Amino acid sequence: MEHHITVRFSADQECDFTLHDGDTAGITWEQAQAWIDEEYVNTGYEAANPVGTTPLADKILRVAMAYGPQPFVSNTAWARRFVRCTGRAIGKIDIAVDVARQIIGSSGAARGARSETSTSP
């Protein structure tokens, strides 16, 4: 099965990735979460929630925002790892990480329909 992940920074700057089951076969859900957590901590962001926890969607968006579009445009090893871990952690086959609008949803949702997951600014 193919998984499609789009990372969008603006209406005219988006990167599309296609993953096959084998691309994420070696990554468990726990490993994907741990990698996203580690990258989130590396960005220097503080927990967005007053009780000290940050939702997964917020972590993914903030990591993408901190690294910016260049790793995705250049299809770096880091960007491919980000996409694999995001796909495994979210567990959907069609994911859009819309950094500009601060939402994660399906590609259609991030292009204008209501999002599946939105975050606070």
Image (tube, grey):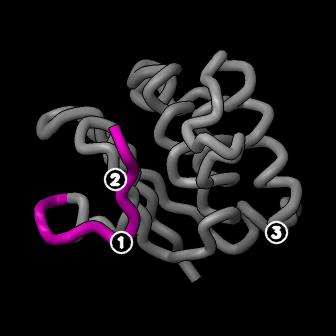
Q: Amino acid at mark 3?
A: Ala
User: Image quadrant of residue 73?
Assistant: top left
Instruction: Answer with left or right where residue 68 lies relative to residue 54.
Output: left
Q: Residues within 10 Å of mark 1 (few under 14, many from 20)?
A: few
- Numbered disc 2: secondary structure: strand
User: x%, y% of residue 87?
Assistant: 60, 62
Which residue is drawn at the image coordinates 37% and 45% (left, top)?
120
Q: Amino acid at mark 2?
A: Ile
Which residue is drawn at the image coordinates 29% and 65% (left, top)?
107
Residue interval drawn in magenta: 111-121
Q: Residue furthest bottom?
A: 1
The quadrant of the image that shows the N terminus is bottom right
Q: Amino acid at mark 1?
A: Glu
User: Quick check: 97 above or below 77?
Assistant: below
Cα gap from disc 2 to disc 1, whole angstroms: 8 Å
User: Image quadrant of residue 52?
Assistant: top right
Sequence-wise, the earlier of marks 2 and 3 is 3
Please state which of the two labelled residues, at mark 3 or mark 1, is closer to the viewer: 1
Q: Which residue is mark 3?
A: 25
User: x%, y% of residue 116?
Assistant: 35, 72
Cα gap from disc 3 to disc 1, whole angstroms: 25 Å
The quadrant of the image that shows the C terminus is top left
Which residue is drawn at the image coordinates 39% and 58% (left, top)?
104
Secondary structure mainly formed by the magenta segment: loop
Residue 116, numbered circle: 1
Asked if residue 99 can be seen in this view, the reply is yes
Q: Decide: marks 2, 1 in contact (CB < 8 A)?
A: yes
User: Image quadrant of residue 14?
Assistant: top left
Q: Residues within 10 Å of mark 2 (few under 14, many from 20)?
A: many
Sequence-wise, the earlier of marks 3 and 1 is 3
Q: Which residue is mark 2?
A: 103
Observer-nearest of 115 and 68: 115
